[in-house]
Amino acid sequence: MHTLRRIPVLVAATVLVLAACADEDVDIAVEDPPEDAHDDADELDDDPDVPEDDPDEPDEPDPDADERARDPDLDVDVTLTEVASMTSPTAGAVGPDGTLYLAERGGTVHPLTDDGVGEAVVDLSDETTTDGERGLLGLAFAADGSELFLSSTDLEGHTVVTAMGVENDQVDPEQRRELYTLEQPFANHNGGDIAVGPDGLLYIGLGDGGGAGDPLEAGQDLSTPLGSLLRIDPHAGDPYAVPDDNPYVDDDAAVDEILAFGLRNPWRFSFDAETGDLWIADVGQDDREEVNLVTLEEASGANFGWNLMEGTMEFAGGEPDDHVPPIYEYQTGGDEGCAITGGYVYTGEAIPELYGAYLYADYCNGLVRALVVDDDGQVIEQDDLGVDGGQVVSFVEDDQGELYLLDLGGQVSRLDPA
């Protein structure tokens, strides 16, 4: 199990823009970041040790277990293969039959086929705004494949999570219900990512609501869902139920749906497909872009610090006693980028050298980067992989664990061995 207190790795580079932007509401489109020199972080240690089998009591093989050791080699040569072109892709999810579905920011959802992007199976364009950092921002399928969940902003700019039925592996927009709605005070820092966790529950990432420096002080305010990661049960209650083990269900001063808080703009978060660990990339204000890693047990009630902290730096106050610091951070405003885009732990087979590495990027420079952590969740290696995904707003994981990058400018690429 990972410890809650970790020593972060600090490297140089970035100022915030995308689903983050510090001083004012901005569109997702940004100019090139400044070209200040920066130093890559040094490796901290050797690769993590892989425990040896006990020769006296060999384990029985598990036919479903992945026997590969997590010992990534970040010197591997990779490339990006363009597989489709869209107007403004933002998110993706795998359907029950293995089909990969991709969202357009303007409000449509399309299957990815061998010939590119297919006809829309969902069209919310008449009820979706793309002002500021808004649009159709998140997709996820229920664990049993019975529904498609969509996270978007309506014409009033409010966050709306919608469920649509799936029958015979086909999305049916006629079977539609509204799960969750939240009024947003500003056009930025809305979050918008959603994911179904290993527990089958639906997780909703919400930013602090926007404005510079968290003017609403939402990050540390448990009475608002802003600045938090929510967890709900979409298949119980009407329209959903709050899990009994959410940390604040018995706290009258807190929002029952909150699982963790202290987030500025968790633009992208994901679960390790094999361990279930939760990775959250939180976009920073002026100084730090950060990566957070916790187990699901540790996530319950976790305080990631904003706005008292920005990464490991004090921002609006002293460090809270319950602060869960990032495992990794880099400076906002230089060559490394200005707005982090979280990705996934790679579990595919096409690039075995990357197995177990966490891949992410930055919207402002496009470089695909990787982190390697040991068994205690400590970063022991980081590097870029030498490929540029453009204005990377999202990674998408297919049913084989392979990763795709979505460039807001339109390109959909798959990460392949060179």
Image (cartoon, grey):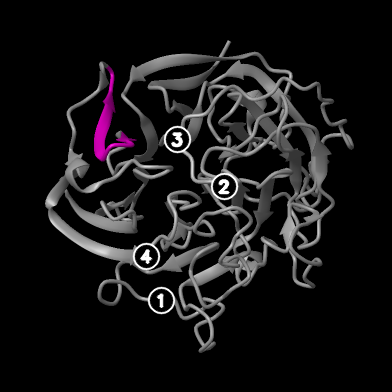
Q: Which mark is residue 396?
A: 3
Task: Give neighbour class at mark 4: few <14, some 14-19, many 20+ (Cα, 10 Å).
Answer: some
Q: Which residue is mark 4?
A: 182
Earlier sequence position, callout 3 versus callout 2: 2
Query: Separation of disc 3 and disc 1 at Cα?
Result: 27 Å
Mark 3 and mark 2: span between their CA atoms? 13 Å
- Residue in view at x 75 percent, y 49 percent: 327
The front one of 283 and 356 is 283
Image: 316 above or below 224 = above
Between marks 4 and 3, how big is the CA–CA gap?
A: 25 Å
Amino acid type at image mark 3? Val
- From the viewer's perspective, tell me whether residue 372 is left or right of residue 415: right
Question: How much space separates mark 1 and mark 4, taking CA atoms?
Answer: 16 Å
Q: Residues within 10 Å of mark 1 (few under 14, many from 20)?
A: some
Q: What residue did someone put label 1 on? A: 242
Q: Secondary structure at mark 3?
A: strand
- Provide residue 31's location: percent of width, then percent of height: 55, 24
Magenta span of residues:
101-114
User: What is the C-alpha distance between the residues marked 1 and 2?
Assistant: 23 Å
What residue would you read off at disc 2?
Answer: 272
On screen, 226 above or below 372?
A: below
Specify which label sits upstream in the sequence, 2 or 4: 4
Position of residue 319 in the picture relative to residue 208 (left or right): right
Mark in front: 2 vs 4:
4
Asked whether 52 or 55 is in front, the reply is: 52
**Who's the residue at 28% across and 18% down the image?**
114
Q: Nearer the viewer, mark 1 or mark 4?
A: 4
